[in-house]
Image (cartoon, helix red, strand yellow):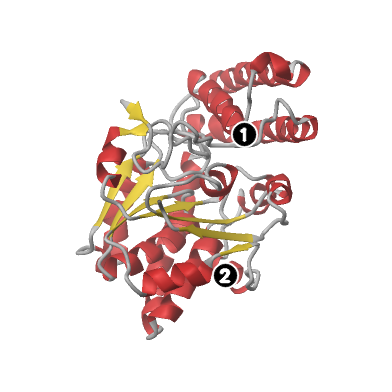
Amino acid sequence: MQLSPFVKLSDPASYVACDWDLAADADGRRYWVDLFKRHFDTVLELGVSAAVLRGQESGAAAARAQSCGDEFHREFNAFAASPRDFGRITILTLDQWRDRLLRRFGFVDAFADVKNRENEQMLPLLPRVCRQLDALTDPAHQLRAAIEGVFAGNIFDLGAEETTRRFLGQTVDFFAVRSQLAPRPWLIDDYDALADRLLGQGYRKCVFFVDNAGSDFLLGVLPLTRWLAQRGTHVVLAANERPSLNDMTIHDIRSWWGRILKAEPGLNDLPIESISTGTGEPLIDLLGVSDELNQAAADADLLIIEGMGRGVESNLHAHFTCDALNIAMLKDSSIAQHVGGKVYDLVLRFRIGG
């Protein structure tokens, strides 16, 4: 797949996806290397389970996992011991190292069964969320509820240690999370400016970079997408080409879309499409996205970059030629501290393009 800089970047030459150089930050490097090591054990356990469920012999799958883990630790230990030998290294780089090894050893989509389980659990709730929005007769109240739904859904993040502990073996209670969100003002809070624009002139076309499966996509992203599309905005759902953790890929969206439309038929006739970003990490480097995405985004006047990885760990300070919204719940203590907050703080950054 041909990859090129994202067409909406203001200045690709000065764009940096992630500004946190772990090679130069000893404390940050130690935190992230240790976290990736602990988390990788969970990933491999899921990968072995997924392989066995698909008919592979358990001993062979376990042996592949052992070899994969050994190689992973060699690479990460080498970086920890001699960081300056590796140049500039960010969390995105660590994601790329991890996912490359998983694919090399045959664990292409370790979280496939977790994603499917959560989608199965959350899909029946989509009509309820939509009816709740419809019952709010004031568009301003609908928008606020839809935004809070994105925050609440985004808690289902199995790349963050805190939420992995909470939700790996149990389903998210979306409605409980939504009722317990931090009050405004949020850690980064440009909601008033966003509401003025959305409730006023509105937008012709929005590219919506989506994040996780389950409550995140089905109960957060889709109700906001529906609200935008009902008001005349053509929405492009932009998702990973390759699996990574519990992120919703373009293939996941397309395989579930028929069931989604059956559950919530009101989505059928709305201007919504889905596009592959061409990428395959929880963070996104907009210097290399698919030509398909660039063609679809050429006339977009709004970007929504959702999730802690895409919207905070990467691209929080990116500048675009059109308006852009970064929206996420913070689920990692180090990321929260890096941006001046704490775990479960909320980020809504809205910038006018130009």
Q: Is residue 172 left or right of residue 6?
A: right
- 230 relative to 341 in the view: left or right: left
Q: In the displayed orientation, state which residue is furthest to the bottom.
A: 137
Q: Say which residue label 2 marks.
A: 178
Indicate which disc, 1 or 2, sits on the residue closer to the N terminus.
1
The three-letter amino acid code for the residue at tag 1 is Ile
Q: Which residue is drawn at 41% across and 41% down?
A: 9
Amino acid under label 2? Arg
Q: Is mark 1 on a helix, strand or loop?
A: helix
Q: Is residue 148 something that shows in the picture? A: no
Q: Name the residue under label 1.
A: 91
The quarter of the displayed image where residue 97 is located:
top right
Residue 171 sits above or below residue 320 on the image? below
Question: Is 56 located above or below residue 310 in the figure?
Answer: above
Residue 156 seen in render: yes
Q: Which of 262 and 307 is in front in this view?
A: 307
